[in-house]
Amino acid sequence: MKITDIRCGRLRVPLKTPFRTALRTVEAVEDIVVEVHADTGHVGYGSAPATAVITGDTHGSILEAIGRYIAPRLVGQHIADLNRTTRLVQTSLEKNTSAKAAVEIALYDLFGQLYGAPLYRMLGGGDPAITTDITISVDCIDRMVADSLGAVERGFQALKIKVGTDIGEDIERVRAIHAAVAGRALLRLDANQGWTAKQAVSAIGRLEEAGVQLDLVEQPVKARDLAGMRYVTERVHTPIMADESVFGPIDAIELIRMRAADIVNIKLMKTGGLSNAIRIADIAALHGVECMIGCMLESSIGVAAAVHLAVAKSDAITRVDLDTPALCACDPVEGGVVFDDSRISITDAPGLGIRRIDGLEPLAACA
């Protein structure tokens, strides 16, 4: 199976309600979709959203990176040579992790199709069923409480609460949600780099003193402030998770060496795809550090790849935050991974198992 063509398209999926964090507000998922075509007629799919405030990638930069730098290196390559093709992707240009992720996901999809097996089996196997938390966007207290109760009623057993705007209001939001759900769901806080180290210690300490038990607090300080992250980790009982502080394996090694956080959040759009995500999971497992698998606001194409990774690396990936399909008004992707609110399962279809994508707007061929 050889690569003959790489094409790109655009996919837009409305959200049920606007998604608000300390960094941005989004009303729809908008992805660049990559199709890698093979001489056998098989097609591998990958995707990436624009996340300029996190990875620096925009739709324009993703298309430019794929069309000018990544795709020309891949045409004519054999799908069976996965180590070679992923290395070609990763060394094609610096940064541009979302563009690399979209192409790598498609390559792994074809790799599974080549051998007639779902991707998670090619990565080591596992139980093809997991559960995810759901994100509660930043809003007024009453709305966040109502959203939390609605999520629990839908069967979600873990809530990821967005905070990081106003520290006093953040504490009141969390205390109100904690009182409302009354132990029916785990509470995870995502501060999105919104606090200083001292603010984080104060806020988390006040919540702990109030009897609010948190499963974790995600990225309380700025991404590059590893010393600040360690300051927080050393001074609170609640587990601290690094997100934007860890993009690749080298970041993970440094974070673990410094003991700057208790948990690492893996996202394919940060790691540049599955190859580096696998390395991070293996590094964490060797050091006894737990991981979460997360996603950006992206379509179920990229999220499906993350699901396969979570299943195959469940020894290291103990928490799942793959809720974007549950936040979308519909899922235009048919086949492969089944998203049913908190419950996610994988079929036996080869690769990612994608059969059709409704509403995909074709763009110019990348190669």
Image (tube, rainbow, N blue to C red):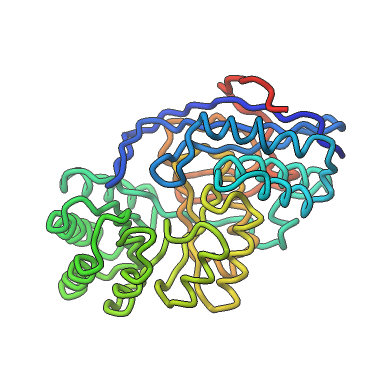
The image quadrant that residue 2 belongs to is top right
Q: Is residue 53 left or right of residue 200?
A: right
The number of discs equals 0
**Which one is nearer the viewer's eye here, 208 or 253?**
253
**In the image, residue 121 lies at what x, y percent?**
73, 57
**Which one is nearer the viewer's eye here, 277 or 57?**
57
In the depicted structure, whether residue 298 falls above or below residue 261: above
Q: Is residue 56 left or right of residue 121?
A: left
**In the image, residue 216 lies at what x, y percent?**
35, 66
**In the image, residue 348 lies at what x, y percent?**
72, 47
In the image, what residue occupies the spot 84% across and 36% down?
76
In the depicted structure, whether residue 56 falls above or below residue 329: below
Q: Quadrant of the C terminus?
A: top right
Q: Quadrant of the N terminus?
A: top right
The image quadrant that residue 7 belongs to is top right
In the image, what residue occupies the spot 19% across and 69% down?
207
In the image, what residue occupies the spot 35% across and 61% down?
218
**Which one is nearer the viewer's eye here, 129 or 275?**
275
In the image, what residue occupies the spot 51% across and 51% down?
270
Q: Is residue 325 visible?
A: no
Q: Is residue 111 left or right of residue 64?
A: right
Q: Is residue 165 visible?
A: yes
In the depicted structure, whether residue 251 falls above or below residue 88: below
